[in-house]
Amino acid sequence: MIDIRTFESLGGADHGWLKAKHHFSFAGYHDEARMGWGKLRVWNDDLIRAGTGFPLHGHRDMEIITYVREGAVSHRDHLNNEGRTKAGDVQVMSAGTGIRHEEWNLESEDARIFQIWVEPARRGIAPRWETASFPKEGRKGKLVPLASGRANAPAEALWIAQDAEILGATLDAGTEVTHVTQEGRLVYLVPARGRITVNGVTVPERAGAAIRGETELVIRAGEEAEILLVDLPPED
């Protein structure tokens, strides 16, 4: 099953400084049919205006992965972590027992990000934050693990507290990549840029593909594309 959630069908909010599209129920957007996808609870497609951002606020017991598509975001938290994550790079925040942080676009251009929330395998872990660079050229024609809690995760992938994996790739027009997963696992895939097909099913730019019961995914780019997918454990 490959269920396409078009960009136009997503929930959203326009706060002026922040324009957000929600693949799943979030904040003021509620849809009983879109409460998440397994352990995936949030996939937000955000535009953050230059010189604005999220003031100090808190989270608990959630793995929060930020993929920066354009521009950069700067992070600061109560654990004295500070850092700047630029386009193509990833940051992970394990909220655990509680973390208070702020996130700003301190640049002169707007920032575009995907923010992904995954439920942790257990509650009450120590909060943490880290960021890493993943050059787009290094992902050309192949899926690269960006964040993972799987036993076979490569050392360069940022750790998350769940048996899940976030992978990214860039594809030239007419090229393809294959993702193989285990029986029963779920996948959620979004093209950040470009139109693709997954096992022959068209997925437009910034649409979501909720995938179940497919252990081999052939992802083909109809045009130059940048994709992100989450491979998740079976539902409880």
Image (spheres, helix red, strand yellow):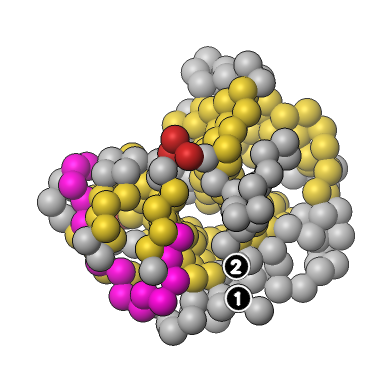
Task: Tell me which residue sits at (49%, 81%) in the image.
Answer: 184
Is tag 1's residue or tag 2's residue first in the polypeptide sequence? 2
Query: On screen, 183 above or below 157?
Result: below
The residue tagged 1 is: 235
Q: Residue extending furthest bottom?
A: 183
Amino acid bearing label 2: Gly
The vertical placement of 183 against 153, above or below, is below
153 or 4: nearer the viewer: 4
Q: Which residues are magenta?
A: 210-224
Q: Position of residue 223 (x, y in %)?
A: 19, 42
What x and y, as percent, mark residue 53?
Answer: 68, 25
- Neighbor class of circle 1 (other Cα within 10 Å; few <14, some 14-19, many 20+) is few
54 relative position to 111: left or right: right
Q: Which residue is mark 2?
A: 38
Q: Is residue 214 magenta?
A: yes
Q: Is residue 137 left or right of residue 15?
A: left
Label 1 with label 2: CB-CB less than 8 Å: yes
Q: Is residue 104 above or below residue 40?
A: above
Q: Name the residue at 74% across, 44% down.
A: 81
**Which SS class for mark 2?**
loop
Instruction: Say which mark, if any, is on residue 88.
Output: none
